[in-house]
Image (cartoon, rainbow, N blue to C red):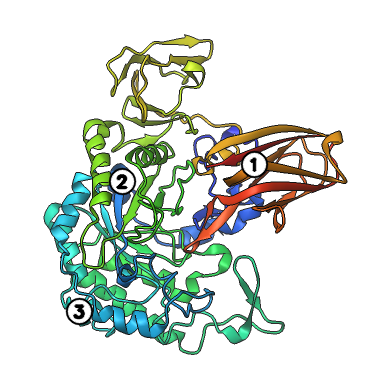
Amino acid sequence: MKIQFSNKLALSIIFILIATHSFSQWSVLSSDPRPAHDKGEQYLYQVFTAQQWNASNFAKPESIKWHNDARYGMFIHFGLNSYVNKDMSWPIVYNRKAPDQGHGAYPDSTWQKIWPSLFKLEKFNADEWVKIAKDAGMKYIVVIAKHHDGFHMWDTKYSDFKITNTPFKRDYLKEVINACHKAGMPVGLYYSQRDWYHPDYAPIDTNTIKRIPNPPYYEALPGKKVIPGATHHKYIDYQFNVVRELLTKYGKIDIFWFDAVWWGGMFNADMWEAEKLTRMIRQLQPGILINNRTSLPGDFDTPEQRIGMYQKRSWESAMTLNGSWGYDPSHPIRSAKSLIKEMLTAAAGNGNVLLSWGAHFDGEWDPAQKDTLLKVGSWLKKYGTAYYGTRGGPWMPTKDYGSVHKGNKVYLYVFNWQNQKLTLPSLKDNAIIKASFINLNEKVVWSKEGTNLQFNSPNLPDASVTILELTMQKPIKEILEKSTWSLFDDPAYGEKILTKQIKTTDWKQNSYTIDFGNVKNTTGIGCYNNDGNISISISTDGKKWEAGGNAKEKTEEISFSTFMTGVYVPGKTIRYIRLQGEKPSSLKIEVYAK
């Protein structure tokens, strides 16, 4: 949907790169219009009243400044899953406990008994890991302490299911944290409240619910109230103990990264006594940052497997180096060019990238993954001044460009010069006094055309991104509003592959079918100037069809997503799209793929 916004929102929330159909999480006030406009995915937003928000706990603004300045961190996903080179927990654990559902591929006896008995980490070197992170240009590290499988990567006194009861014997987490401290690298701990191993974990009593197909995926049975299981209070006691242990045993911890996202009410703060728990964390570690995955607002939002939207409130996109939360050679490693574009686009939206990788089962860093990260690091050594310490704006990011500012400097990231130029609205009461390229040996040709600024394409644009440095008369105070947005502004949706104007006479028996000729990784369809009621179906072979969505409004933009390890990401294998229903008098469609 294309939506108009009032000028009152210009300096607070600007709508760009909406995280649709993803396992992302935005904590918002009830005055925020996003949930109402993003009708199909309201469960992505946890809405708080001002009273609820103000009653919660937050880090002080000065405590989060370093995180906003850092822009780029490392997310280490490593555990028992590396024995089979798969994602953590989701494809592994056969018995996922409610409210989660479904099954992994391995029985309890395999991942709980056999794999730990083989866990030796012969090639693990924490100092090497941290050095690679620094050489890759990363400014902080978040490491998995416990994932959904319940395996403790530290020497806890509250469970025997832990790393020190393997042949490795040592405290893995302690070694990583110590290496970070030694290198002056801020370090955070990932801790999942979900626990598919712990015998007392029971955030909902399954006798009180029935399953439903959409978030939160369960509802109370008639005459029942959803309550915790009988043993869950014991799990809460355990959780307070291990969190306290983590924050008193290893020195300074900079971030605590929870992972039981609200997801339309699937999880809630009462399941963890989250207000009490997070206040304890801040008492034990003054200045620590806490994300928003306890169903409290927290200090920053957490979109996942895609770059988020522009907003003043801090956010961090959790991304993967190869599409997997762990080492998985079946997934191709992404290019340094694509990673750099992702990082710059996030910065232009005023957010961070937390990039995940995973080691081999023996603790060795995969050479190909290391090589890619070091290429990014080499680029950042040259041009990091245009990235680190910046804030998003003054111009809103698109697929073609983004902007950031720092003091009286503005940096333009241009990925694609449409029509050999870039046209932007002028800033009020703040003129450009100097313009130069920081990664090209050419002069910037630019002019003021009415109320716009026009920058001409260089003769030889950089193959990845052309960066312009604009020296302004004074520091940036004005963030320019984007008056309209489209779902497909989000780079996660790829490129437009089809535009078609469909006439009434093109329909056959109230049906119109699009055939791409071969399968495409199709991410979505936009229906414009629609005055009908259209149902959309999709197929790979033209025989078996599944529902793709409905277009009832004049403008409807519908995403096609695939569920991947706990997250919906844009992209579905499609060859045919079929429209059925009332014939619009005139319909324009646009299809996107990547």
Q: Is residue 34 left or right of residue 315?
A: right
In front: label 1 or label 3: 1
Could you tell me if residue 46 is visible in this image? no
| Residue 205 drawn above or below residue 366 | below
Amino acid type, label 3 = Thr
What is the distance, in whole Å, between disc 3 and disc 2 at their CAs?
31 Å
Near mark 3 (Cα within 10 A), the count class, few <14, some 14-19 or many ≥20, is some
Q: Identify which residue is drawn at 29% across, 42% down.
A: 69
| Residue 508 drawn above or below residue 297 | above
Q: Which image quarter: residue 513?
A: top right
Badge number at residue 72? 2
Residue 294, position as x, y percentages in the image: 44, 66
Q: Identify which residue is drawn at 44% across, 70% down.
A: 91
Residue 142, position as x, y percentages in the image: 29, 58
Residue picked out by circle 1:
517
Amino acid type, label 2 = Tyr
Near mark 1 (Cα within 10 A), the count class, few <14, some 14-19 or many ≥20, is few
Residue picked out by circle 3:
164
